[in-house]
Image (cartoon, rainbow, N blue to C red):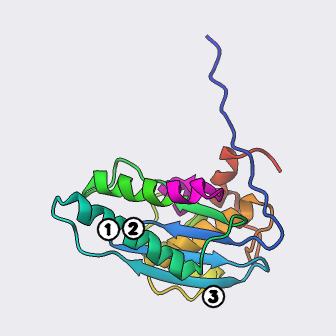
Amino acid sequence: MAAKKKVLHPRPILEPGARVVGIDLSLNSTGVAVIGPDGTFEHVGTVLGTAPHAGDLVKLYARLDALLDGIEALVGGFRTSDLVVIEKALSHHSGPYGEILANWHNVAGSLTRRGITVIPIAPGTRAVYGSGGGKSDKSQVVLQVERRFPTARVANNDEADAVVLAAIGRHLAGCSIEPAPLPATHLSVDKLFEAQ
């Protein structure tokens, strides 16, 4: 039997004036980072979630919509030229998985329906790009982000993860913002995309 051929994703292309938005999505504390067309950080911040809904679907969707509205406000409004890199929602998360998945699909679906390119990145891939190890402690990623991207001025690990996701987007589009070439250990993300 022939080996299954790995399908590679096409690399994103940044249009002139495009921003790259990294989103570390959470029901409680979502990190957001925006890299402007010139490669500088325009916004880095956190969107806090509202109280859990206690099984009330109306309150659940109000919570999810409030998160999306908060992300949109922090970004300054999404544009169709934006490239959004968002951490994948995976089944190993603890907590209310149905709500986590609904939140992910609410944000990613809304952006995709508006014609915005959305690239989902696995948490392990984000961690490897951020610190060189897929099992890296959140504090290690924060330290690496503070060292590599001091102008991002991150306040917590959610913002650090969002900065890494935005940096991955720039890297995949061929316009890295890295201050120095990264070691090969950080670049496992390249295996998922077509060669440049």
Q: Residue at x 59, y 66 (%)?
A: 165
For the residues labelled 2 and 1, the Cα–Cα distance comes to 5 Å
Inspect the image, locate mark 1, and give the three-letter code of the amino acid beneath it: Ala
Residue 124 place in picture, x, y as percent: 50, 55
Contact, CB < 8 Å: mark 2 with mark 1? yes
Question: Where on the picture, by quarter, is residue 14?
Answer: bottom right
Q: Secondary structure at mark 3?
A: helix
Image label count? 3
Tell which residue pokes out farthest to the left in this image.
54
Q: Residue furthest front?
A: 58
Instruction: Kindly identify the residue that appears in the image at 74 percent across and 74 percent down.
Output: 177
Q: Quadrant of residue 76?
A: bottom right
Where residue 146 appears, x then y in whole percent? 57, 84
Kindly identify the amino acid type of the residue bearing the numbered disc 2.
Answer: Asp
Image location of residue 12, percent across then percent down? 74, 55
Q: Which residues are magenta?
A: 108-127
| Mark 1 neighbour density, 10 Å: few (under 14) some (14–19) many (20 or more) | some
Please tell me which residue lies in front, 60 or 21.
60
Residue drawn 44% across the image and 66% down it: 25
Residue 109 is one of the magenta-drawn residues: yes
Say left or right for 19 vs 48. right
Q: In terms of sequence position, does the residue under pointer 3 or pointer 2 come before the other?
A: 2
Mark 2 residue element: helix
Does the magenta segment cover residue 122?
yes
Q: Residues within 10 Å of mark 3 (few under 14, many from 20)?
A: few
Side of 154 where 59 appears, left or right: left
Label ID, residue 150? 3
Residue 169, position as x, y percentages in the image: 67, 63
Q: Secondary structure at mark 1?
A: helix
Residue 62's disc number: 1
